Every structure is written in structure tokens, then in C-alpha cells.
Image: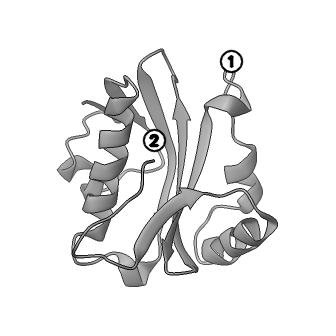
Amino acid sequence: MKDFTHPKFPTIHIKLLTTTDDLEQLETLLTPFSVSRDTITSFIPEPRSKDSKYLYGIFDNDTLIGAIDLIEDYPAAQSSYIHQFILSEDYQTNNLPETLYLSLEKTAQETGTTLMHLNTQLNSDFWNNQGFEAHKKEI
């Protein structure tokens, strides 16, 4: 994702999770959720490779507050698959989840994605409010 900047959320930024420290923070972030670090870091569906996987960290200053696990060109070309979209409970207000999703959608569109798919375990009113029907959305 390109640099995330938003006047309402000046301390929030997004970057790829790549370092040991990032992954340790991810493990801490996931403690209250029913998802393990290995589930997220090792998920790469066939026939995709690690080159199509993007594990984004959402940070408030230096503290990891969320993660987005995205697979590009899956399950088909010009589509993206949101495997996980996790945000600490303290940050699920003030439209931050919507703002983050819209930033992800915009980045996906810029790479040629025309259809977003959603992990069936991510079923909530939030996703319905973002326009997902039957776990997919044209963008």
C-alpha cells in the first residue's frame, strides 16, 4: 500500500511486516484473536507464490494495532483476496476500519484489481457495509 495519510488519523501508518520485531508485535496483536501468527504468515494459496502475498502492518506511531493479509491475483487474475483484516478493539471506532479498507481498495485498483474476495471467516456487518456480497465486491 502506498503511504497512508489521513488528517483524522495523523499517527496511523501502514508498512509491510518484514522484520523479526514486526512479527513479534504481530504475535502480541493476535493474542485476543482466534488467529495464530503462523496461520497468517504461512498462508499462500495454490498456485500463488510468496511474491503475491502482502502482509501489511497498521501502526499507531511504533505500535502495531492491526494487520491486513492480502493475496494478489487470487483466486483469479485481476482479483485480490483479503485473508485477514485485524484491528485492535481500541481502534475500531471513528471510521478507522472503513478508512483503512478504502485505502486498501484504492491501492488494489491502482494495481489493476477489479474484484475483491473476502475470506469466508470474515463475515460481519462491516463487510456488508463496504459493499461485499457473497464474500466478493467489484471495485
Residue 68 image label: none
Q: Nearer the viewer, residue 78 or 33?
A: 78
Left or right: where does residue 24 sit relative to residue 129?
Answer: right
What residue occupies the far bottom of the structure in this picture?
A: 90
| Disc on res. 47 | 1
Disc 1 marks a residue whose amino acid type is Pro
Give how far across and how far down residue 115 sits, in percent. Answer: 33, 26
Q: Is residue 3 above or below residue 88?
A: above
Residue for point 65% across, 58% down: 17
Residue 135: quadrant of the picture: top left
**In terms of depth relative to the viewer, which is nearer, 4 or 89?**
4
- Which of the 4 quarters of the picture holds residue 93? bottom left
Q: Position of residue 116 (x, y in %)?
A: 36, 32
Q: How many marks?
A: 2
Tell me the residue at 39%/79% (across/down). 11
Residue depicted at 37% across the width and 25% down the height: 113
Q: Residues within 10 Å of mark 2 (few under 14, many from 20)?
A: few
Relative to residue 29, is residue 53 depicted above or below? above
Judged from the image, the secondary structure of the residue bearing numbered disc 2 is loop
133 in relation to 87, above or below: above
Reading the chain from its start, which is encountered first: label 1 or label 2?
1
Q: Residue at x 37, y 50 (%)?
A: 123
Looking at the picture, how far across and down is residue 8, in whole percent? 22, 76
Q: Secondary structure at mark 1?
A: loop
- Quadrant location of the C terminus in the rendered image: top left
> Where residue 16 sits in the image (x, y, percent)?
60, 54
Task: Please give the residue where the numbered disc 2 appears in the rendered image.
Answer: 120
At label 1, counting other C-alpha atoms closer than 10 Å, the crowd grade (few under 14, some 14-19, many 20 or more) is few
